[in-house]
Image (cartoon, grey):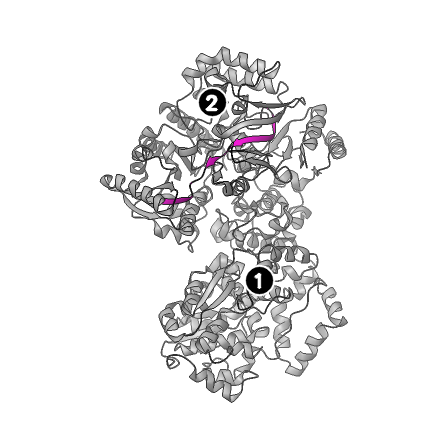
Amino acid sequence: MLPDHDAADLHRDLSRALRGPVRFDAAHRAMYSADASNYRRVPIGVVTPVDTDDVEAAISVCSIYGVPVLPRGAGTSIAGQAVNTAVVLDFATHLNAIESIDPDARTARVQPGVVLDRLRDAARPHGLTFGPDPSTHNRCTLGGMIGNNACGSHSVAWGKTVDNVHALDVLTYRGQRLEVGRGTAGPGIPAELRALGDRLGEQVRTSFPDLTRRVSGYNLDQLLPENGFDLAKALVGTEGTCATVLGATVRLVESPAARALAVLGFPDAYVAADHVVPVRELSPLTIEGMDAGLIAALRAANPLETASRALPDGAGWLYVETGGATRAEAEAAAQAVVAAMKPYGATSVVVSDPAAMKALWRIREDGAGIVTRSPDGGEAWPGWEDAAVPPERFGSYLREFDALLARHDRRGAYYGHFGDGCLHIRIDFDLLTEAGIANFRTFMEDAADLAVAHGGSLSGEHGDGTARAELLPRMYPPEIIAGFADFKRVWDPDDRMNPGMVVRPKRMDEDLRIFVGMPTIADAPMLAFGHDRGSFTRATRRCLGVGKCVTESGGVMCPSYRATGEEMHSTRGRARLLFEMANGEVITGGWDSSEVDEALDLCLSCKGCKRDCPVGVDMAAYKTEFLAQRYQGKVRPASHYSMGNLPRWLRLVGRLPARVVDVLNAAARSPLGALAKRAGGITPERAIPPIARMAYTRTTPRPGAAVGLGSRLRARLGHSRRALLRSDRSTATPRRPAGTRGRVLLWPDTFTNHFDPGVASDAVAVLTALGYSVELPPREVCCGLTWTSTGQVDAARRVLKRSLRTVAPWLAEGVPVVGLEPSCTAALRADGPELLPGEPLAAALATGVRTFAEVLADHTDELAAAVSGPRQKALVQVHCHQHAELGTEDDRAVMAAIGVDAEVLDSGCCGLAGNFGFEKGHYEVSMACAERVLLPAVRAAEADVEVLADGFSCRTQLRQAGTREPVHLAQLAARAMFRDTEGIGRQTK
């Protein structure tokens, strides 16, 4: 590491020479200190060049100071090659243009920071694609793929990255810029490399394994005359150790117009591996494999997951994708695979629906994250991650590999590119103790010997990095190892390009981020962290850097990153800062860390990461813990007192006469409201939502008793006797008598009760019409969410305990509790046990609470029979907490039953997210989240399309954005069942 004064001078000179950001602050050095591997190395600083001139200037300055340089893509490398004590050049932010596509030549010219999926999208209109497709395809960059020689699931058909690169524009550490490719001639570097190829030719021909997935070592075979002396291909897989890629011309391949997936089930993964060779003979696009351990880990980590139910019987599976000009042709090819495998006893299913195929592929693509944690918080790590052997020996290799695991008392679930003999696995290495690390080393050495004995490569996809470079002498003879060093010396005689990788490697058991990052803070969390064995620091290790949170679209996480594009605002960036905070080396100050506070300030606590992150990182819980610890015994931000205590304030307002509530609502729209917002830490751009003139619970004359349909409707303001009679008589089939289906307890959450009581009216009407006896608690109850989200854990516990005591009689009798607000229902199901881990009532409520849709989903036939008339169209904005904790399967079934054609938006968070969008300083990010997908979709919808948003936050965002009035599922259901009215709740707004 540079002395502080030299680092300051370097920072100054880089800042003067570049137009792009130059960051040497603790936060950025911490966030870039790890990739998706086991390793941690703190960089000198991070440079984000805006163009190639910036890159040349940066390397020029670094060469003057003699400091190492590390070109970086998405930072998802698994072998440790994307971390080093160097100046990191982050290409993903600006150098990400697709410069041209030539459909006739089937080539594309790209900058190194282009995300693979963007290239594939651009090539799709021409019927073309880029063949290699790692599971990180929606965030990995072409530069990173070139650095690692990435492959992906379609290498059976289209090869590795090296097979798909035509030419490279590169810059050496000494400032020489070259365009290299096949047959590059000239003095200097080309001439020296030609001489190296001539000298080592025979050794390369005899010692390089004949293997489609050989990624380990440098591609010295590309220097041979029979391979065209291709310097571009020779540089692929050099892991940034030779030169910096400024641009690339890559090959595109024809993409089938239609695809189908044959999923084959076998008794175990060994038998699946035994049969890849006959499947290869049918020329499929891909042959992927999974072990039963992966599926078990998936189902344990995500109980809401449903795609794995479509797998055929078995304990080992092959995914065989086929293509064709039409869907029928692709299906026929898949059926041919099934027929060929039937004599071997394979079970099968063929899928050609794109949505169903995407769901099945997600299982495989999320494998790297899924198998890193067991349900009880056990940890597993990369390291021996992706060795490859000849496909015909793969079954035998798997059996011996499992025996090796057993000898070392290690376990792991695996998956991989079975068609190419490539195995992916995460192993439960003990990286916390010296004895465990010694076992890690001996296992790696034995595993290397096993792969080589089968004619394999130490790496079949992810490169050598720190994890495997030290083992290369077990795979190659000394002459080749010396040849690798000569190859690097020609390109980088100063050894300043990502040193310590491939050539003169660092030890594979040095700089292990878990061991060197042992926590210095007291591990006494206020939340239970039940999935992490009660340890906050263990939770901070959950993020392994696979980077699914740094994608541009799809799913819910991470809304603030998508709004700002800053690593600090990604789940991964925040998790690394928390890890480093616990470590205390780079991020100092512990819970008072300003860097962590800044990063978490724009976390919406949407919980999207809990569902979307393959490892189940729960940043909302981490933020709660951080705020709880940071402000323990201290004065809090004003918004914690105003919005954190919102249920308490609303309970007081709810006792006031309606005319007084009218005065308060008017005051909120006056200059007094502006003063109140300023005092409460609320951003001035937000309007304070109007409070209902009468809370729903005040309209029930006998709290704790059953709420009948007639009495409920009569109690609502604005209903005439004629309307009541119409609603009683307008169902297509007679209603069941109330109570014939038993009792349910309605949870009158704060938001529904005090802001949208009409939603509760409609819900009670529908439930009563279905034959339920709907009851209310004798006093107001609260899940404590507003206190939890602002880190007031002690207060949240008190509130929840009081509510649990209130509903205890119903829980004791097993009466289902029905929630209407997704955030509150999710809090009861998931947050309650975290707040009160030893409380039986919290556990009982977590299992006993049901969403409105979950109750109605038991009666879809009855609902469908009761509904007639034209179908209704709706755009559906799913609340983030519902996405994370509850799922939408039942909601979709209910909507179909009541005649709603729903388009469920893949829009992510609406941006309001409870108190977040109201807090000062958050308005721009809040609205940027909404403007990504949600608001444009609503504006573009036809006038007769309803906007369904069960979450009060979502409805508030839509209302304040000036779009049409959103509705709750209960309102749509009431309107469908009582179709002669406009909807009970709608009339009483």
Residue placed most toward the observer, 788 or 682: 682
Q: Is residue 648 left or right of residue 765?
A: right
Per the image, the residue denoted by label 1 is 938
Task: Indicate the position of residue 639 as horizontal and vertical percent values.
Answer: 68, 62
What residue is at 63 percent from the left and 59 percent from the top?
Answer: 916
Q: Is residue 267 magenta?
A: no
Q: Is residue 264 visible?
A: no
Residue numbers of the magenta segment? 240-261
Crowd tier of the residue under label 2, counting other residues whose Cα lies within 10 Å: few below 14, some 14–19, many 20 or above: many
Query: From what the image shows, is residue 430 above or below residue 661?
Result: above
At label 1, the amino acid type is Val
Quadrant (top left/top right/bottom left/bottom right) for the N terminus:
top right
Residue placed most toward the observer, 168 or 629: 168
Task: Indicate the position of residue 670 as horizontal and vertical percent values.
Answer: 74, 73
Question: Which residue, as the protein is rendered here, is positioned at the far front?
Answer: 104
Tag shown at residue 686: none
Helix, strand or loop at label 1? It is helix
At label 2, the amino acid type is Leu
Task: Indicate the position of residue 848 as horizontal and vertical percent values.
Answer: 42, 66
Query: From what the image shows, is residue 760 above or below residue 269?
Result: below
Q: Is residue 113 left or right of residue 430?
A: right
Residue placed most toward the observer, 332 or 114: 332
Tag shown at residue 472: 2
Q: Judge depth for marks 2 and 1 and give the one in front.
A: 1
